[in-house]
Image: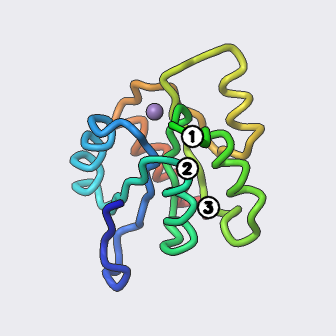
Amino acid sequence: MRRYDSCDQSPPLILLVEDRQSNAALLQDALPPHGYRLDVARDGNEAMAYMYEMRPALILMDIQLPGMSGIEVIQRLRADPQLRHIPIIALTALVLPGDRERCLAAGADVYLAKPVSLHMLLERIAAQLVRM
Ligand code: MN
């Protein structure tokens, strides 16, 4: 898990939960120039530990993860009074019928199918942060 200093202020902190290094690297390059800090968790357990400690402004959640699925992580977050308000954007490569509904029913605020254009992602992130 890569962390920024918690005393570092200003740019909104985003947690990306993503098991594929290449996907994570793409966003680690792409988001900071647009004014966001990005940390990466590789699986659900790492993500939960991170969220209790760091309280990110928003979560980008891959759904296909080793161990606990993204859906399960979303359900856990939504069941936790301390974490339930954090916006979640679900990302999935595996688009099955009902996928979108499952993500939204679990508590995701937005559902995007991969590959996601950077433009679209930035737009959705900004909209969720304004909503808070
Ligand atoms: Mn994955």
Residue at x-position 74% and y-position 42%: 106
Residue 9 to residue 14: above or below:
below
Residue 102 to residue 2: above or below:
above
What residue is disc 2 on? 44
Q: Residue furthest top?
A: 97
Check disc 3 and give the amino acid type.
Ile
Quarter of the image for residue 35 reads bottom left
Q: Earlier in the sequence, mark 1 or mark 3?
A: 1
What is the CA distance from the residue labelled 1 to the residue labelled 3? 22 Å
Ligand 1 closer than 8 Å to the CB at disc 1?
no
Pointers 3 and 2 in contact (CB under 8 A)? no
Which element carries disc 1, helix, strand or loop? loop
Label 3 crowding class (10 Å Cα cut-off): few <14, some 14-19, many 20+? many
Residue at x-position 33% and y-position 63%: 37
Specify the label residue 86 is tagged with.
Answer: 3
- Nearer the observer: mark 2 or 1; the answer is 1
Q: Would residue 7 be found to the left or right of residue 68 on screen?
A: left
Residue at x-position 51% and y-position 58%: 58
Disc tally is: 3
Check disc 1 and give the amino acid type.
Gly
- Nearer the observer: mark 3 or 2; the answer is 2
Which element carries disc 2, helix, strand or loop? helix
What residue is disc 1 on? 67
Residue closer to the observer: 99 or 21: 21
What is the CA distance from the residue labelled 3 to the residue labelled 2? 16 Å
- The N terminus - image quarter: bottom left
Label 1 crowding class (10 Å Cα cut-off): few <14, some 14-19, many 20+? few
Label 2 crowding class (10 Å Cα cut-off): few <14, some 14-19, many 20+? many
Q: Would residue 126 be found to the left or right of residue 131 on screen?
A: left
